[in-house]
Amino acid sequence: MPEKSPNQSTKSINDSLLALDITPKSLSTSKSKFDLQAVFTSPYASIFVTLSLLLFLFGLSYFIAYSYITKPKAPENYSECVKSKGSLIRESYPAVCVAKDGNEFIQPLSPEEQKLLEVAN
């Protein structure tokens, strides 16, 4: 087998490169494809992502603040316990109100009612 000279191998590579279709038509079809890198590096995409994150963070902070403000307070006395949702009133004398969190509040009695309940010595 005869050996190829370096010029012959170069010619065959050049011939194969020239045989490729590098017309403007083929170049224009490659540019019409969707370029993902151009989308992520465009300034419009950066602005859109920034505004979306700001809107999301604003909504999240509003939700947290709203839930903190409207959080129901635990009752601190018998009358608040009676008015709060989910509390139970035991039928006893004096009445006992049990709040959702388990705290118990006893109905305050007037001095006359307290005298009636005192045990005589």
Image (cartoon, helix red, strand yellow):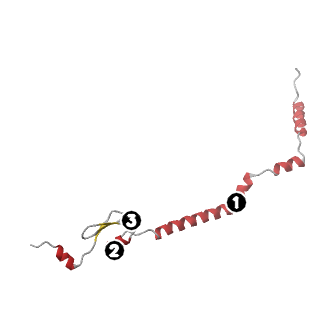
Residue at 87%, 24% (x, y): give it: 3
Q: To which quarter of the image does residue 104 belong?
A: bottom left
Secondary structure of residue under mark 3 = loop
**Mark 1 element type:** helix
Q: Residue 82 falls in which quadrant of the image?
A: bottom left
Residue under the image location 70 percent in, 60 percent down: 45
The quadrant of the rendering that contains the C terminus is bottom left
Amino acid type indicated by mark 3? Gly
- Between 34 and 102, the residue placed more toward the observer is 102
Asked whether residue 77 is in view, the answer is no
In x, y percent, where is residue 118? 15, 73
Which numbered disc covers residue 26?
Answer: none
Mark 1: amino acid: Ala
Left-right relation of 103 to 1: left
Q: Which mark is residue 79?
A: 2
| Residue on which disc 3 sits | 86
Q: Are marks 3 and 2 in contact (CB under 8 Å)?
A: no
Outermost residue toward the top?
Answer: 1
1 or 2: tag closer to the N-terminus: 1
Q: Nearer the viewer, residue 63 or 23?
A: 63
- Up the image or down, 12 lies above or below 55; here it is above
Position of residue 21 in the picture relative to residue 106 (left or right)? right
Q: Which mark is residue 45?
A: 1
Mark nearer the N terminus (3 vs 2)? 2
Instruction: Label 2, secondary structure: give it.
Output: helix
